[in-house]
Image (spheres, rainbow, N blue to C red):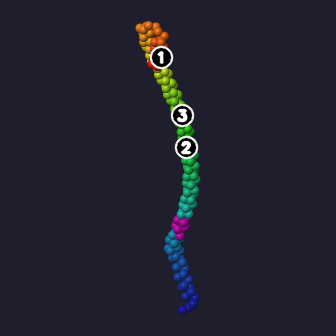
Amino acid sequence: MNLNVTLIAQLIVFAILVSFTIKYVWPPIAKALDERADKIAEGLAAAERGKSDFEQAEKKVAELLAEGRAQVAEMVGNAEKRANQLVEEAKSQAETEAARITAQAKADVEQEINRARETLREQVATLAVKGAEAILRREVDEAQHAKMLSALKQEL
């Protein structure tokens, strides 16, 4: 065999193999590589989107926390104001009630004093009438008169 014929035959077989590979083998491999590259690119894009979404979510959470803290601080301030207001109202009501009770007690004491005076006047009047009766029944004698006055003093 001739070297040239072998070389030409090998070139023809190689050319057929290359053309067969380019036509039938290479497209599925290229397609698989392209699909893999697309998937990797999609994965990287999804990771980037996820990262940006996460950052946005973190910002939103921080904003919501700040807003929540502000609302809580406002609620606490309002509650403290309301508590102080309730305390002041309770003090005012207590002072009003104390003044009313004091006035009622003074009125009651004044009534009792007036009743005691009236009772005392009635008793003094009764004793005076009894004394006058006793004096009028007996003769006017200074010794007996002094005795009656001292007895009246003891009764008072």
Dot label at residue 86: none
Residue, disc 1: 150
* Circle 3 or circle 2, nearest the eye: 3
Q: Nearer the viewer, residue 140 or 110?
A: 140
Percent coordinates x, y for residue 32 in the rendering: 51, 70
Percent coordinates x, y for residue 29 in the rendering: 51, 72
Q: Nearer the viewer, residue 125 or 131?
A: 131
Q: Which amino acid does label 2 sit on?
A: Val
Q: In this view, which residue lies farthest toward the left?
A: 137
Contact between marks 1 and 3 (CB within 8 A): the answer is no
Image height of 33 relative to 51, above or below? below
Q: Of the residues under marks 3 and 2, which one precedes in the sequence?
A: 2
- In space, the residues marked 2 and 1 are separated at their CA atoms by 79 Å
Image height of 99 relative to 46, above or below? above
Residue, disc 2: 76
Q: What residue type is labelled 3?
A: Lys
**What predominant SS class does the magenta segment belong to?**
helix
Q: Nearer the viewer, residue 48 or 94?
A: 94
Image quadrant occupied by the N terminus: bottom right
Dot label at residue 91: 3
Identify the residue at image location x=57%, y=52%. 62
| Magenta span | 33-41
